[in-house]
Image (spheres, helix red, strand yellow):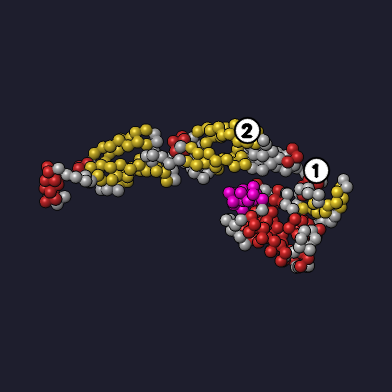
Amino acid sequence: MKDYYKTLGVDKNSTPEDIKKAYRQLALKYHPDRNKGDKEAEEKFKEINEAYAVLSDPEKKRQYDMFGAEGFRQRYSQEDIFRGFDIGDIFKDSGFGTSDIFSVLFGGGGGRRRGVRYTTFTGPFGQYASGGGADYADFARGGGRPSQGRDMVSDLTITLDEAAAGTEKLISLRRDGKVEKISVKIPPGIDTGKKLRVAGKGEGGPGGGPPGNLYVRVQVQRHPLFRREGDDIYIDREIRFSEAALGTSIEVPTLNGVKKVKIPAGTSGNTKLRLKGEGIPHLKGKGKGDAYVRIFLKTPKKLNTKQKALVEDLAKEGL
């Protein structure tokens, strides 16, 4: 897939002014008037304009950064990418015309409509026009399907317990000028960074087109007791030296309640004991991860006289 940043020679931290400057330099270099008959330059010019059409639009750039090149192209058609992109604004003071730019990008000729001068061009969605400040798709002919509205993204924070059990949350979202309450089902096993799709809850489509989708980006809070690694959870527990040497049983909290865990005699520090199936449900497929109890040996910082004597006796016995 195309990397728009590489195409323009900029990075994600570049300012809008830097992006515009990089685009202008490249666009003038590969402009059709300077490279007549050069197919390679023509293709480069197309790529430059597509990249700038995305990176110069704050919302399109945000979506591109969030979903990546492949995910972005699944949400934006070629028509969507160039909607609202004013090529003439860049070249109006350069001495170059724009009529042949549309021909290079989409192919086509010129014409009039309702007394407004514009240049028509034929693209993958039919015939469009530019002029008088109109979007390219505003003069689309041929009765094509109306454009879908833009997708929206909302962040949602949940607890680890909610991520493990699954839950349903209400989020407030402003759609088309109104605040709306939207119910979002959280499946068991969700993890930070996962996105949930709520169909038809994005922005309304232009000209009565279908709405886009809502993508809910999930953030799972840290748990005060458990550490999550994939679908497994880890719990740290301290035991005394005598318990490690002789063996014992301890109670351990899990996501499914308190469990009794047997500590075998001779357990050393940093030992991991597995509790099968006591972890997080697998998001895809059946079953659950495991819980691991990590054992640490508790070493007293101070010993009384009797304890010190006993430890010295143990040391004499090789312990």
**SS at circle 1:** loop
**Which residue is at a point 54% across and 34% down the rendered structure image?**
185
Q: Badge 1 is on which residue?
A: 143
Give the percent coordinates (x, y) of residue 244: 23, 44
**Which residue is at a point 67% across and 58% down the rendered structure image?**
20
Q: Which residues are magenta?
A: 57-73
Give the percent coordinates (x, y) of residue 276: 37, 40
> How many residues crowd mark 1 within 10 Å: few (<14), some (14–19), many (20+)?
few
Please tell me which of labels 2 and 1 falls first in the chain: 1
The three-letter amino acid code for the residue at tag 2 is Val
Q: In the image, 124: left or right of 195?
A: right
**Which residue is at a point 25% across and 45% down the rendered structure image?**
297
Q: In the image, 213: left or right of 109?
A: left
**Which residue is at a point 30% across and 48% down the rendered structure image?**
270
Number of marks in the rendered image? 2
Whether residue 298 appears in magenta in the rendering, the answer is: no
- Asked whether 282 or 180 is in front, the reply is 180
Q: Badge 2 is on which residue?
A: 179
Q: Which mark is residue 172?
A: none
